Amino acid sequence: MNHNGKGFYQVFEVFSRKNDTAPLQHQFSLLAPNHEIALVMAQENFMRREPVSDIWVVKRSDIRQMTEEEKEALKRLDNKDYRTTKGYGYLKKKWRQYEQQMLDEKEILSWKGEIQR
Amino acid sequence: MTVITSFERLSEEEKHQRFMERIEAGEKIEADDWMPEEYRLTLIKLISMHGISEIMGALPEKEWVPKAPSLRRKLGIMAKVQDEMGHGQLLLRVAEDLMAPLGKTREEIMQDLFKGDLKFHNVFHMPAPTWGDAGLIGWLVDGAAIITQTNMLDASYGPYARALKRICAEEVFHAQHGESIILALAEGTEEQKEMIQGALNRWWDALLMFFGPDNASTTGTSKQDITIKYRIRTKTNEQLRQDFFTKYVPRILSLGLKLPDETMHYDETQGKWVYRQPDWSQFKEIIRNNGPKSKERLRLRELSYRNNAWVREALSCSSAV
């Protein structure tokens, strides 16, 4: 393989995680001849300052991206209240009639610790 | 499936209209989206020039790495040089994805640079003879770059906007790195104060030219109307230059420095800075690679490209095993 010719460099997409609980985030792409150099370059190019706990490199040719037309089908209609808490907001008032508080997201996600009586 | 056939069936004019509607609605265009040829070519020219300028821009500064006056200064300027190369890597990637349908790669970008077909920013053709120049580049050249780059943070081309967001975040460090050198010299000996005044005098015209001519009549060509039409940028060259004056002239004066243009003042009635035009014929010569350091820096870049060829060669062998 000629190092100046086409096919030497490949495009890698770089993903990283800030810390162990953070979601994997797309950083950018880079050119490298193989996965190992791509990983070194990823650290040099994108992680010079920010805290980072993990880096992934993926060959772009292994990723099935969406086309412009396919993305059109991702647009949402604003009629999905029944899927979200927004469609159930009236419960707050209802529960008040029974002298109870609504179990909202904030309340439910607080239950991972001790549950207070 | 029906959506796909219907998009394919659109005429070129309908695709163009849909494209304009998208960018006018603030949507971002991605590399594989349909785009007008003029948009693609304008972006390739703009972004490959920007990317290669980051790399050529590291050359005047890297001269000061071995000569920096203290270890802390050496580390600071090394970090900055490394950032500039990183910015070059980001931007070249954006340009390469746009060039891919034309069958062009990084190799062609480098060859175009060596042949003189790909230009780099006028400021990077200039010498940096003193430590004052090193500070001034960080303070004012990066300051000028921040003004032009922040103007494109909302660019209609998504990959460029995302690259600029990363770049501008690091430019904040560059600006403060430059200010730190300049303020140390401004509070130093008479000789040190003269050093920054000398650097300002040397760089003034190049700084004014950095934003490009007011309009095409000055230098024959200007891409600013096209980039504004396609929402790549919002302000004209002159607006950016005025913004630069507004942000930096008061700071320059506050340090007791003198502007190398005795006619310069802010005109309250016109609401703008009045200044002496730099010699635009000189600008044209500089960007044709006839500036004071053009040839030397191009040669340095070409040498390092050639001297490092063995690394690429070695890697291409290992990847074939």
Image (tube, rainbow, N blue to C red):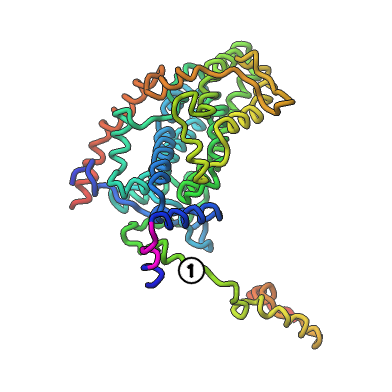
Residue B109, position as x, y percentages in the image: 32, 37
The residue labelled by disc 1 is A74
Left or right: residue B264 compared with residue A35:
right
**Residue B8 lies within the magenta run:** yes
Residue found 51% across the figure and 52% down from its top = B23
Q: How many marks?
A: 1
Q: Nearer the viewer, residue B56 or A79?
A: A79
Pinpoint the chain carrying mark 1: A
Is residue B10 magenta-colored? yes
Q: Is there any visible trace of residue B199 in the rendered image?
A: yes
Residue B138 vs residue B22, the one in the foreground: B22
Please report the bounds of the magenta region as a residue range. Answer: B6-11
> In which quarter of the view is residue B246 placed?
top right
Image quadrant occupied by the N terminus of chain B: bottom left
Up the image or down, B1 lies above or below B158; here it is below
Residue type at tag 1 = Leu
